[in-house]
Amino acid sequence: MLGWELPPHNSGGLGVACYHMAKALALKGAEIDFVVPYSAEHPNIDFMKIHSATKLSPLERYGLGAYDSKHLLKHLDGEDASDLKDMRGVQQRYVRFVERLVEDNVPDVIHAHDWLTMEAGMRAKELTDAPLIVHVHATEFDRAGGADGNPLVHDIEYNGLMMADRIIAVSNITKNIIISKYGIPADKIEVVHNAIDLDSFDGDYEYDRRTYNYLEALKSEGYTIVSTVTRFTVQKGLDQLVRAFAKATEKYDKLALLLAGDGEQRNELIELAASFGIADKVFFTGFVRGKQLRDAYSVSDVFVMSSVSEPFGLTALEAAHHGNALIISKTSGVGEVLHSIFRYDFWDINRLADQLVGIATSSALQSSLKDNIKQEYSRFSWNDVAERCLSTYRAARERVYA
Amino acid sequence: MSKKGVVLYLHVHQPLRVRNYTVFDVATNHDYFDESSYDTDRNNEKVMRKVADKSYRPMNSLLERLLAENPEFRLSLSITGTFIEQAEKWAPDVLESFQRLVKTGRVEIVAETYYHSLAFFYSRDEFERQVRAHQDKIREVFGVETKVFRNTELAYNDELGKWADDFGFKGILAEGWDPILGWRSPNFLYRPVNTKNIGLLLKNYRLSDDLAFRFGNRAWKEWPLTSEKYNEWVKAASYDGDLINLFMDYETFGEHQWEDTGIFDFFGAWVNEWLKDENHTFYTVSEAVASNEPAGEISMPNTVTWADTERDLTAWLGNAMQHEALGHLYAMEDHILRTGDVDLIADWRRLQTSDHVYYMCTKWFTDGDVHAYFSPYESPYDAFLYFINAVRDLRYRLHEDHHSGGLNV
């Protein structure tokens, strides 16, 4: 299995999904060699063999250029330092590592996650004739927020999707992008929605009201807390979220918006809130993880996933698990498998505002949404995802070796 | 010995669906039922025109033909006030065809609440007003008096039976539900407990649902259902009783079961098949009550409906949103009526139509049976949102135009 990250060294949902998927597959008897592009300890992973393609630290895996700092390079020898200075260099090294790995360790199936590992996947297929499964968690169209994105990345994705024996997409939205933007026939693609691992959430977590003390004070005065947790990039539709929130406050004043995360749009969003005169109602936390992240979910009543393009959207399920009502844009994949939610077109500010006011002003509506969603997501399991992967493997092997 | 009779009763109804009425419309626009887009089933005109073509026109012409050809053929209809209002506007020829049916003297109109509401469970006074309003409308449109009552969704309990007796109805309709009947058959007339002069007709749900729900289902082991086969089943049922009560939605014909299932041809053929035997006939609901003695007394202390496998009201009053929606609506009764504002009162009553809360039902979602959610809304939560916004606007109108009530919903 070819991946780019695993917890605790992940920057987003990809690592979480790979971790749970691999674990569920291992429980079903799969022997997995998992390749990551960095060297680090993975203390909780004993169910598969992790291979490090480079000596880079997890922070350096997207290339060293971004950090532009000599001290990061100290532990690398001269050749590494020049090869690995950017993402392409890291990817090329990753490909060479995989070439060597499959030489004396021929896999039954190659499972590659997203464009970052697709070149390595194609190379491994060429060398071994093993079937290639490409698992699409996001495409360049998603990352570019509807624009075309980087043509080089697009080319790699196109080649990977063409060469794949089977493709797994995390939602119908993603499947449709693969069909319409990459011209791949529909019957080559299976949709396997991600799941949420509830065990990893329970444990000894206890909500600490002091983390967001001011928001708690507002709640005790009858405020409803609206939140989202995301990267502040154009694909996430936050501009429309802030506009809709402003519109909602015209009709009902006791609303606060918690924007957890960080990204290039942060300053723009701060200015936008100020321009509507609601800066006092919009809260920016910066990047949060661990306990602070979970407390952000816990303090919130309504979680909005406002994405212009979101292949799946695991944060929505996490928020629901912490007692939020969900409002999800129609261009977010997770909305395909949920029913006890509000949906809206990401550009439809009036509709979102109406939904926000409705939830804030009706306790019956709010509690129905919060309670009913729990019965839905608890039915999704990584075990089912692993089952679907295994049957995809079998189908691909039958085709290749027939 | 009197003849074995089929009591065919069809329920004709269309609600006035609430448009996507947002919080930005509240206190600005009061047009809750005027969906502007023609592409959605929230558009009442569109639905009326569609169902008129698929169901009301072809079925009424079939019924007219059957009445002309068979002197023994009879049936009963309940037609809601919200249907009549919409037919007057968008399908006057359909209303005229119902008038021609009633003029034959062999089509009886059954009484109910004008607004197809659940008022019986919230306000007895408002309930009676709606029953009387329906009687007035039926008199005006059809020139007949109603004698037999059916409540919305056939929701029945002992109290309702007693009420209908006291009100002067000769008969009342309910579900023939096994847990109530036990060893008894629905194919007889019964007397509701604690009543003197009223007869209780119980739906034979197996034979009714064979048509209403199963007829076009290719996965059903009896598919395709022929008129001969169905007639054998009806005859078999008639051996243990005198009345076969076939109660269903009128829209079964052409809308729930499309024309291409063969439902119209089947039905015409079956009516003739049944009447081939001279000991067979059809009764209207009043005739069925008048020509039979009650076989016994029936008690239903808890409300029984004709809906779902549970036969209860959980599809209408099963969750907190539904209770809140109707709770707020009925709490306004005194204030609304005191205004004497005809438009305001009519809008308040139109919001009482049971379909509105039915669209808020979440039980299929939580059961995982999503496909059972039939609604012009994207979700039960959207249905609630638009409805509660309309309730807010009613409050605003009370407050602004009549200086009455409070604004706080």
Image (cartoon, coloured by chain):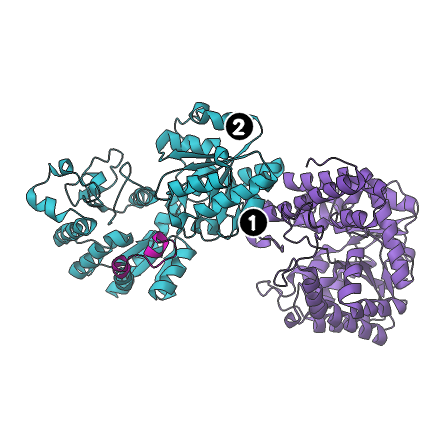
Image coords of residue A349 (percent x, y): 53, 49
Label 2 SS: helix
Q: Nearer the viewer, residue B290 or A347?
A: A347
Residue designated by label 2: A218
Give the left or right position of residue B308, taking residue B297 as reference: left
Mark 1 crowd level (few <14, some 14–19, many ≥20, 10 Å Cα): many
- B235 up-or-down from B397: above or below: below
Left or right: where B314 falls relative to A227: right
Q: Colour of chain A?
A: cyan
> Whole-percent x and y of residue A9?
26, 38
Residue B228 in sight from this viewpoint: no
Question: Which quadrant holds residue B248?
Answer: bottom right
Examine the structure image and report whether residue B42 is included in the region drawn in magenta. Answer: no
Tell whether position A140 is magenta.
yes
Q: Tag 2: residue type?
A: Leu
Identity of the residue furthest to the top in this view: A210
**Rendered location of residue A94, percent (x, y):** 17, 50
- Name the quadrant containing residue B41: bottom right
Q: Which residue is mark 1?
A: A351
Q: Colour of chain B?
A: purple
Q: Which quadrant: the C terminus of chain B?
A: top right
At 40% across and 27% down in the image, what residue appears?
A205
Residue positioned 49% across, 28% down in the render: A215
Q: Which residues are magenta?
A: A139-156
For residue B244, side relative to residue B25 (left or right): right
| Residue B297 drawn above or below residue B242 | above
Q: Is residue B273 above or below residue B304?
A: below
